[in-house]
Amino acid sequence: MAPKKDCGNHGSYYRHKLYRRIFACLLTLIIIILFIILVIWLVLRPTKPKFLLQDTEVYQFNLTSGTNLLSSNFQVTIYSRNPNDRIGIYYDRLDVFAEYKNEQITVATGLPTGYQGHNDVNIWSPFLSSIAVPISPYLVDAIGQDENAGFVLIYIKIVGRLRWKVGSWISDHYHIDVSCPAFFTVANSKDNGGLTAFRFQRMTSCTVDV
């Protein structure tokens, strides 16, 4: 008598084969979709947003006598443009603050968030301030030296997160880091009670890292 065939093993073999084919098809589909996204991304080549520091007013920049406490008050005007013709930008968070010799000297101020369309422009004019913020001892000497030299360099920093929008597709979050140099000449004004006067020199372009 001929031996009976093991139909159960054959059924299991065909099921595994079917699962492998389904998995291979799904994997191929995912690879194709990712490749299409990559090609679109490379063709469009999103350009980083452009930032300019248009103006900076210094209302206060004083050290408390005999201490390392700095009080400062600025108003800055920041210009931002999306240079892309086909890519929009969602700004989900933007915080701006002042920095002197790599040390933050004002609290962070939030900028309005939202969507920036193709070639759109935003202009913000936030106030940046701090009251009696402790700073490193070496900064006390540096501030005195810079003021005596008649020249002070302060950086206006913007940090946050953004997303790119291409058609109906929206990317994951990207970190954005903007650094804007603010150049000032400094003079002691006898007509102003001996107070130090700061004059912003010129509009400057900012470096942008995304």
Image (tube, rainbow, N blue to C red):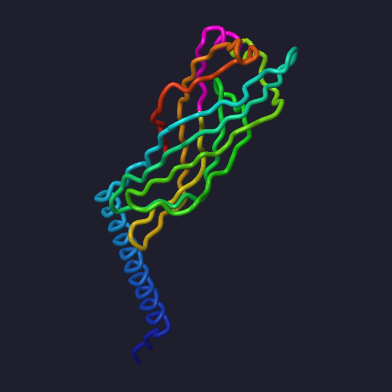
Q: Quadrant of the C terminus?
A: top left
Quadrant where the N terminus is found in the figure: bottom left
Q: Residue at x 66, y 18 (%)?
A: 136
Q: Quadrant of residue 201?
A: top left
Compared with 59, 31 (above or below) is: below
Q: Residue at x 46, y 21 (%)?
A: 183
**In the depicted structure, whether residue 137 falls above or below residue 103:** above
Q: Nearer the viewer, residue 80 or 123?
A: 123
Reply above or below: 169 against 122. Answer: below
- Judged left or right of residue 6, residue 131 is right
Q: Which residue is most to the right?
A: 66
Asked if residue 147 lies in the magenta stretch, the reply is yes
Residue 131 position, x and y percent, is 70, 29
Q: Is residue 122 above or below residue 98?
A: below
Q: Residue at x 59, y 24 (%)?
A: 103
Q: Quadrant of residue 47?
A: top left
Query: In the rendered view, does 167 fall on the left or right side of 133?
Result: left
Residue at 33% x, 52% y is 118
The answer to whether 81 appears left or right of 161 in the picture is left
Magenta residue span = 144-155
